[in-house]
Each structure stands twice: as structure tokens, then as C-alpha cells.
Image (spheres, grey):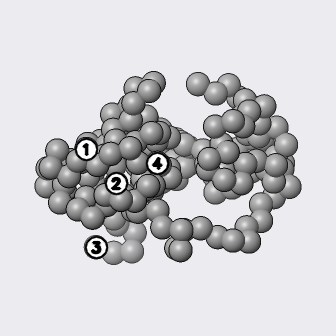
Amino acid sequence: MNAKDFNVFSLGTVHATSSNWVIEISPEYRDALIGLEGFSHIQVFFWLHLHDTDELRKTVTCDKPYKKAPDVLGIFATRSDYRPNPIGLSVCPVKNIDVRKGFVELYYVDAEDGSPIIDIKPYHPGVDRVKNVTTPVWCAHWPQWYEEMGGFNWADEFNFPLS
């Protein structure tokens, strides 16, 4: 394998409804869940399979996705699904883990039903939390903590409808 070739494969699948989110891990990877119990949050890496086209992979900028943003943003300054490598990342609160069945029940994950899981990592404050963070002025008023996100009016931030 050279520096331009990668082998990424699905470890499981997201099953999502309007009120229930479960990651089902494939049988051969279920033992990888051992010891994950007890973490209140995990980082879920998933493939944005609904947006994996040659054309969308060419996306490197977008026109003002946020109302207070500059007229053009580089895609790396957004959390857009349209990316050169369509990888999604979501920090998720864990509801329950069943290692034997390979189920990770979540309170929420920002992934579509059927999204392939490419990795899971435990969220650990000593490694993943940063004390002195700065953001551009156009998004500095956004919530500073995960727990504040639900009460924030995201519809007022975007220049497109939220589904």
C-alpha cells in the first residue's frame, strides 16, 4: 500500500429512526466493544454514503452556508457532508452497550440510517477536551458545550432548510 491508497471498510451500520439510534457492529468486530462500557460518550466515525459521488468529492468550497459566515468557506471550515473524503464524525452520548449482540444504543448520532461505521473511539476529556478554544467571529455565538446544542435555534444559523 502506498501513501495514496487506503483500505477502509465498514465495521457496522447505523440504524436510525426519528427517536432511536443504534450502531450494530459486525460479528467479527464485536469484541472491539469490550471495555467501552462506562464511557458516557463516544466518537463515531462514519461514511457519508449518501454523498459519496465523484462530483461531490470535488467539493472544496461552499457558498455561505451559515448566515453570519463569509461569502465563501473552504469545506474544511464546515461540517458539510460534501467532502473530498466523505467521513462524518459525531460525539454521541451512550445509552447502552451490548457487546454480545454488538449493539451500541445512542441518544443521538448525526448519521443517516444505513451509514457504514468506520471507527469508534471513547470520548475522554483529558484527551478530547480543549480548555482555551477560539472560533471565528461568525460562529463564536454558537453553543460552547454539547449539552447546550439542543436548545440552540440552528434554523436561524443556516442558509438552507434543516431536514
Which residue is under mark 1? 103
Residue 135 pos. (x, y %): 77, 60
Q: Under tag 3, what secondary structure?
A: loop
Tag 1: amino acid: Phe
Tag 3–tag 1 contact (CB < 8 Å): no
In screen coordinates, is 114 left or right of 27?
Answer: right
Say which label, 4 or 2, has the lower sequence index: 4
Q: Which residue lies under the disc numbered 4?
A: 93
- If the image is split into quadrants, where does the C terminus sit? top right
**Separation of marks 4 and 3 at Cα, in angstroms:** 36 Å
Q: Which is more toward the observer, 14 or 105?
A: 105
First along the sequence among labels 4 and 3: 3
Residue 118 disc label? 2
Side (left or right) of 80 relative to 89: right
Real-space Cα distance between discs 3 and 1? 32 Å
In the image, is residue 116 above or below residue 45? above
Residue name at image x 52 percent, y 73 percent: 127
Q: Secondary structure at mark 1?
A: strand
Horizontal side, residue 96 vs residue 70: left or right: left
In the image, what residue type sits under mark 4? Answer: Pro
